[in-house]
Image (cartoon, helix red, strand yellow):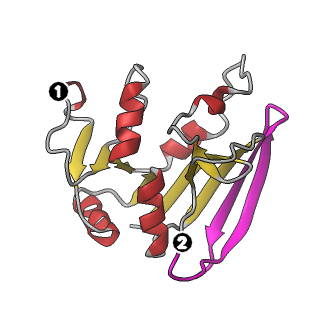
């Protein structure tokens, strides 16, 4: 079974994934009247599970929408001990360093993992555990916020795979890790 870790995130032109208050309202700045999917459904179809940071999990819960994921979600948290009742069977809480988290996921039969959440992505990148990056760049400069990329212990080289433009403004680029 092939093991692969994916990152799929949106960012501002200046590399932020949330504004200075942690807000994501800017992600809706471009109208999408036809509800164009922009590849997310196909992306989710190729993964087994999501490893999501606690902050991202709590942000998704704050949207007040139906649970948007069709695959199991493993929430990384040292503090959260219990899944809210409405999400039992959909969400599981796990903890550990990135390699331990992957081992936990593999033990559950999950080999193609979507790594989601700023801090979680940064720790996986720091251990060179992201095989594919898909970034959708929004045409806005936030000036401050939560950065997508943090300081790394070493450089990571990726190769361009494809670029698509959606709604004449959103640029989505996919890169594969060169090993």
- The percent coordinates of residue 172 (x first, y second) are 72, 48
Q: Nearer the viewer, mark 2 or mark 1?
A: 2
Count of numbered marks = 2
Picture quarter with the N terminus: bottom left
Check if mark 2's residue and mark 1's residue have beta carbons within 8 Å. Answer: no
- The percent coordinates of residue 116 (x first, y second) are 45, 50
What range is drawn magenta here? 152-179
Instruction: Please rate how many residues cluster around mark 2, counting C-alpha atoms within 10 Å: few if below 14, some from 14 to 19, many from 20.
Output: few
Looking at this rendering, what residue extends furthest in the left direction? 81
Residue 9 tag number: none
Q: Is residue 129 above or below residue 94?
A: below
Q: What kind of element bears circle 2?
A: loop
Residue 151 tag number: 2
Q: Can residue 55 be seen in this view?
A: yes
Asked whether residue 162 is drawn in magenta, I would say yes
Asked whether residue 124 is drawn in magenta, I would say no
- The percent coordinates of residue 154 (x first, y second) are 55, 83
User: Magenta span: helix, strand or loop, mainly?
Assistant: strand
Q: In this view, does 135 lie above or below 126?
A: above
Q: What kind of element bears circle 1?
A: helix
Q: Residue placed at 23% from the left, 56% from the top? A: 108
Separation of residues labelled 2 and 1 (CA atoms): 37 Å
Residue 85 tag number: 1
Q: Which of 20 and 104 is in front in this view?
A: 20
Q: Can residue 70 be seen in this view?
A: no
In the picture provided, is 21 more to the left or to the right than 27?
left
Picture quarter with the C terminus: bottom right
Please identify the quarter of the rendering in which residue 95 is found: bottom left
């Amino acid at each position: 079974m092939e093991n692969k870790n994916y990152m799929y995130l949106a960012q501002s032109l200046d590399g932020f994934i949330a504004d200075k208050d942690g807000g994501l309202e800017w992600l809706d700045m471009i109208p999408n009247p036809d509800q164009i999917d922009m590849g997310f459904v196909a992306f989710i179809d190729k993964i087994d599970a999501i490893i999501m940071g606690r902050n991202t999990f709590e942000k998704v819960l704050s949207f007040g929408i139906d649970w948007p994921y069709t695959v199991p979600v493993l929430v990384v948290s040292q503090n959260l001990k219990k899944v809210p009742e409405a999400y039992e069977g959909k969400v599981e809480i796990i903890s550990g360093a990135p390699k331990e988290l992957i081992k936990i996921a593999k033990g559950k039969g999950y080999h193609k993992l979507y790594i989601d959440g700023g801090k979680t992505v940064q720790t996986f990148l720091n251990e060179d555990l992201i095989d594919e990056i898909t970034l959708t760049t929004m045409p806005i400069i936030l000036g401050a916020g939560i950065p997508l990329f943090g300081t790394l212990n070493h450089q990571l080289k990726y190769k361009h795979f494809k670029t698509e433009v959606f709604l004449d403004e959103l640029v989505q680029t996919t890169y594969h890790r060169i090993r």
